[in-house]
Amino acid sequence: MGSTRRSFTDEYKRDAVALITDGGYSVAEVAKKLDISDTTVRKWVKKDQPDKVATVEKPLTESERAELQRLRTENAKLEMQLDFAKKVSTWFAKGQQ
């Protein structure tokens, strides 16, 4: 039995590309987080921003690195809070049945 091919909206693709270009994530990180192949994400980046793919990115400054680390830490904390909220809401929903 063959697998079904997934399709993604243009907005979804733009958001994924934005995570790479503006969010500081690597192609591999975004692909893993979205559960899609690296090649697919690279194609989206290349299609969305063909002139930026060929250029070499300049390294981050110390202040940019510090902010990136702060934002990643904050993001991890918020993801934990969201996971906890989901678990609590599920627990309460089961209790009301």
Image: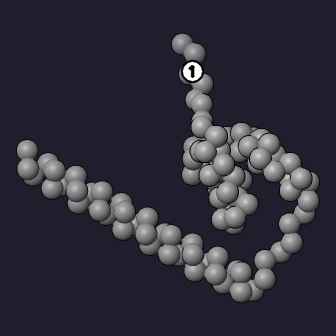
User: Where's residue 30, x and y in %?
Assistant: 64, 53
Residue drawn at the location 43% of the way across and 64% of the way down: 79
Give left or right: position of 32 versus 44: left
User: Where's residue 61, x and y in %?
Assistant: 78, 83
Vertical arrangement, residue 28 with respect to residue 5, above or below: below
Q: Residues within 10 Å of mark 1 (few under 14, many from 20)?
A: few
In the rendered image, which quarter is residue 57 located in? bottom right
Residue extending farthest to the top is 1
Residue drawn at the location 69% of the way across and 64% of the way down: 22
Residue extending farthest to the bottom is 63
Q: Which of 62/51 is in front? A: 51
From the image, which quarter does the C terminus lie in? top left
User: Where's residue 69, x and y in %?
Assistant: 62, 78
* Residue 67 visible, this angle: yes
Vertical arrangement, residue 34 with respect to residue 59, above or below: above
Q: How many marks?
A: 1
User: Where's residue 56, x and y in %?
Assistant: 90, 63
Vertical arrangement, residue 5 with respect to residue 56, above or below: above
What amino acid is found at the position of numbered circle 1 in the picture? Ser
Q: Colour mode?
A: one colour
Q: Which of 94/22 is in front? A: 22
In the rendered image, which quarter is residue 58 located in? bottom right
From the image, which quarter does the N terminus lie in? top right
Q: Which residue is mark 1?
A: 3
Which type of secondary structure does the marked residue at label 1 adopt? loop
Give left or right: position of 93 versus 68: left
* Residue 38 visible, this angle: no
Residue drawn at the location 9% of the way across and 52% of the way down: 95
